[in-house]
Amino acid sequence: MTTLETLPDEIFLIIFRYLHKMDLLYAFSKLNSRFEQLITPCFYEMNFTSQNPTLCYPYKPYLRFIDYVFSQHGRKICLLKLGSELQSKLLHRRITQFINLESVELIKSYENNDSDEFLKILLSIPSLSHLKLTIKNDDMLKTIVTQATSNLTTLHFVDLPEFQIADSCRKLIHVKRLFVSLRDYCNRNLPMLFTLIPNLTEANLAIKQFRFNSSFSAIHLKKLHIEKRNFFPTDYDELQEFLSNFIQAPLVKFTLILFDATRDFGDFDKLTALVRHFPYLESFHYYIEKSDEPDTRFLPHVEHVEGKYNRYAFFTEPKSQPFDYVRKNRHLSAYLQFTQLRDINDFRTCKSLEIDYDSLRFRLTHLFKIVKDLTILENLTKLSLNCMFRWQGKDHYLYPLVDTDEYSFLRWVLRISPKLNTLSVCTDCTKDIIQELRKLTSSQTSSRIIHFHAEDIAKYSCTYHSTFFKELAELYPSLKTLSFICNDEYRKKFPETLLEFIVTMRNLFPKLVCMTLGIIYQMDLDRYMKTLDQSGLVGESLSYEVIMSYPHRRRTKIVGLNIWV
């Protein structure tokens, strides 16, 4: 008779693929020597960013996992990826046990003392050689400069803002590889970075323009990767002048990625002229998109860009890939507004779709003809419904959808999107939005939605109704994350304390993991934080963090309070 113990290792490895790594390691760690050996490779990389950026794993099991598994196996972890400051807080007292940690990615960074202390601890680990993070202020960059060990050889700055750092500060002479995505038009940062990191042999740059205030040099650089972060046209002469900064570098490999090149780049002779001043160059790779057909000498590596009219791409094989997270996530049709949908391929490749009232009304008939035979949207995971109501006049009167075809189209999108798990709505009246969602939500859709974001319920005239969350729970009982605005109307309809409200939400949404409150007033934020800190629950059964920007469309600054339950 076959028992569990008699199954071959290969079968267990297949089964393990379907288990959450935290469940897997917690269940089989220290069970016996055979399973210990089977799960050991799973410790090499711990990635807590692979699902939703908002935490999708309950607080208590995560805390138990940190205390038990990490304390026993911290030395086996070499790659660590964190998606939230809350995760960093829990790892704060354990991170020194990761004595073999080689690479860390901090997808989200915040401006507070805890983040700075955690960064200092990470930099003190002798084995750390790769660090990826978002620089929020000058102090974070100064911490890296002053605390980094000689083993730190690779830096990856995500969305780097303008910064100031003294010329006399310590240089990062041991860093050899740099990945940097420059925010906005930071035309001073790049020259300063090459001064700060003088011994670079590889530079990967995602930038928005090629005009800089001063020249710079990189005399040790052997590999250069440049990609444009936006779709604004790239000027040939500006790029040529920018590349003159690298003439003294012994470049052997150059990669260029442009998504809206001007006519000059389609001239084969002009494109190759960009690299004629690099005598040691062994390979020149490119991926370039432009609105008209390029020179015939680029053939056969020319193609029409999928889902885009009058747009061509020419490239070298294998196709060069962007490293910038914005470009990765929004390449081609990954994120689209309804007005950008052109053909059936746009629907097929779209991962996140935003639909507004006017575009739905005026483009619906045209799009129905294009996609009527489509049976599945296999990539769509997020739908933003900003079409449920429209603004009218200065008093912002709201008019709900009344057209049967509009409802049919939205129901069709929801029905044929098996991976759709995130729903974002925009309204000024919770009672009305519940009524509209009832018309759209089937039993199949109801169970799939696990992330719900209430966007733009932040108007001071917003009306909450007392049964909003109860009715929302009936519609989407499997919600793991929920975000909404806390304004005057919210406080009137839900007068209970924050702790009582958390208990209520836990009862309504049994699977709820993270709740984000959009806070308009600083006094409300201070009161909520004080309530949580004095409850005795923080660190035991829940945790929280403050994020400086709650996703919304208003100009008023809204701070997010993430509560992990």
Image: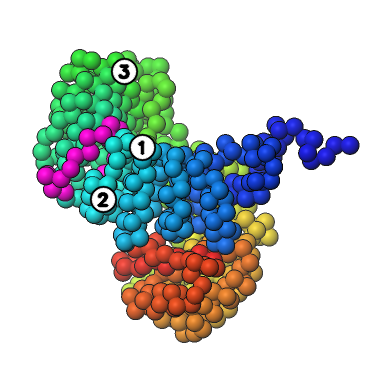
Q: Nearer the viewer, residue 476 or 294?
A: 476
The residue that appears at 42% across and 56% down in the rendered structure is 92
Q: Earlier in the sequence, mark 3 or mark 1?
A: 1
Where residue 36 appears, as percent x and y from the top left, is: 64, 40
The residue that appears at 16% across and 49% down in the rendered structure is 165
Q: Earlier in the sequence, mark 3 or mark 2?
A: 2
Q: CA distance from mark 3 to mark 2?
A: 37 Å
The residue that appears at 29% across and 21% down in the rendered structure is 253
Q: Is residue 59 magenta?
A: no
Residue bounds of the magenta highlight: 165-182
Residue 9 visible in the snapshot: yes
Q: Which residue is mark 1?
A: 129
Q: Which residue is mark 2?
A: 143
Quadrant of the image occupied by residue 73: top right
Quadrant occupied by the N terminus:
top right
Q: Is residue 474 depicted above or below 233 in this figure?
A: below
> Would you say the residues marked 2 and 1 are in contact, meaning their CB atoms lie under 8 Å apart?
no
Q: Is residue 106 depicted above or below 287 in this figure?
A: below
Q: Amino acid at mark 2?
A: Thr
Q: Amino acid at mark 1?
A: Ser
Q: CA distance from mark 3 to mark 1?
A: 27 Å
> Would you say the residues marked 3 and 1 are in contact, meaning their CB atoms lie under 8 Å apart?
no
Q: Is residue 382 depicted above or below 236 in this figure?
A: below
Q: Amino acid at mark 3?
A: Ser
Q: CA distance from mark 2 to mark 1?
A: 16 Å
Q: Is residue 170 magenta?
A: yes
Please tell me whether mark 3 or mark 2 is closer to you in this view: 2
Left or right relative to 241: residue 19: right
Q: Which residue is mark 3?
A: 283
Q: Secondary structure at mark 2?
A: helix
Left or right relative to 376: residue 295: left
Q: Earlier in the sequence, mark 2 or mark 1?
A: 1
